[in-house]
Amino acid sequence: MFARLAPGILLVLLIGCRPEETRTPAIAEAFAGPSTLTLHQDLSPKSPPAATANHGDRLDVLEYRRRFVRVRTAEGKEGWTDVRQLLTPEQMADLRLASQNAAHLPSQGAATAFEMLNIHTEPNRVSPSFLQLPENGKVDVIGHKLTPRTQAAQPAAVKVVKPRTSRRHSKQKAEDSRVPPPPTPAAPTAPNNWLALSVPNTKSLEKPNPATPKADEPSSPPAVVHMDDWSLVRTKDGQAGWVLTRMLSMSIPDEVAQYAEGHRITSYFALSQVQDGAATKNNWLWTTITRGQEPYEYDSFRVFIWSRNHHRYETSYIDRNIVGHFPVHVDTSGPAPRFSVLVEGVDGHLYRKNYLLDGNRVRLVDRVIADQTEQRQAPSNPVASAASPTDSKEGSWLSRMKQGVSKLFR
């Protein structure tokens, strides 16, 4: 009895001990870039979905087809996606490091999204979007960058295929080539007045000016480079990324924002509080820029105080026509609030100007050259290299007198 059942038992054991099917070996490692990455069954984006991956999920790259790749998730599901939706291990490490560094950067004010907004890994329209900010969602603005707009890739040129000729047509052409060509005509004779025609006129002797363009050669206009303003933002859970600046609105109260006069508010800070009866109002500091697409963050800053007599906001201090950079620092821990701005001097150096809000008046405390860290963060401005008398410790008696008088009226 046992001898009859032994072959069947052995066959069952062999089937149970069969090794698992071999998996396709991975040729590279990648990470999902968007917040939700859909993997398709075929190359076409219209093909049915095969699996999904979340931002930061590790994927095994199995196969390349031009700009499409076949990847495998940690659960073993495979599918196709665009290579631009993936992040390399180096890019993923840089993104995590950027979030860690952004946690220590001071906020330049909260901003609200006009509509659902994509947060990108880099200040680039084609970079992966790893998070979506919902409509009316808020983020902290911590940086700014001006970058050229990335153009879409040009389609490949169509290869021109020459028409094939039949053997009969080529044989007929070869027979026709055996017939000798007709004799060439005689060369024409020179005209009788060829000597008079050979004398140059005065206009032909003039040397052309290479700087002057010819009338029949229209000058080509310079290539227009479109730029985009990007803001580095930080979400409530500490993630940092880039969004288009024009899609954000700084969340300063409307009773203060109405004084912007068409300028864009780039940062704002609450300096102190004022009690007006039952209402509590803040004294504000903001920075604005006349128009966007500039390599700096603001060209004016202003301090608003709440007037108990007139029950409205009034300007306590304003400085225009400057070149200012982030970050703006505010310190409200002392008895009087302090703030400092980073501006460019006429000598091309960056200066940190420290101010004090003394009651309703703003006083300049000191003006020092910015440290090396801030010098590297802000781009240089090619201004006049000659130093201003107010920027030099030594100068003529007249320059020192002007500097003293200017301090009295600040």
Image: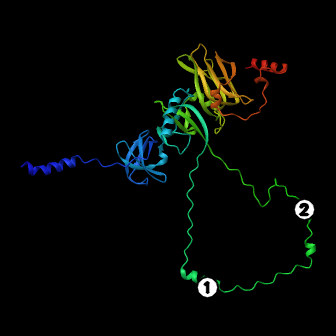
**Discs 1, 2 touching: Cβ within 8 Å:** no
N-terminal of the two: label 1 or label 2?
Answer: 1
* Element type where label 2 sits in the image: helix
Where is residue 125? Give x, y as percent.
55, 44
Q: Which amino acid does label 1 sit on?
A: Glu
Q: Write the residue at 89% across / 60% down.
A: 206
Asked whether residue 183 appears in the rendered view, the answer is yes
In the image, which is nearer the foreground, mark 1 or mark 2? 1
Which residue reaches farthest front? Answer: 3
Where is residue 103? Give x, y as percent.
51, 28
Asked whether residue 115 appears in the rendered view, the answer is no
Residue behind mark 2: 205
Q: Write the residue at 54% across / 19% down.
A: 280
Which one is nearer the viewer's eye here, 384 or 365?
A: 384
Position of residue 252 in the picture relative to residue 29 (left or right): right
The vertical placement of 105 against 39, above or below, is above
Tell me which corner region of the image, top left, top right, bottom left or bottom right, holds residue 167: bottom right
* Element type where label 1 sits in the image: helix
Residue behind mark 1: 175
Q: Residues within 10 Å of mark 1 (few under 14, many from 20)?
A: few
Q: Which amino acid does label 2 sit on?
A: Leu
Quarter of the image with the C terminus is top right
Where is residue 102? Give x, y as percent.
53, 30
Which one is nearer the viewer's eye here, 407 or 70?
A: 70
Which residue reaches farthest top? Answer: 335
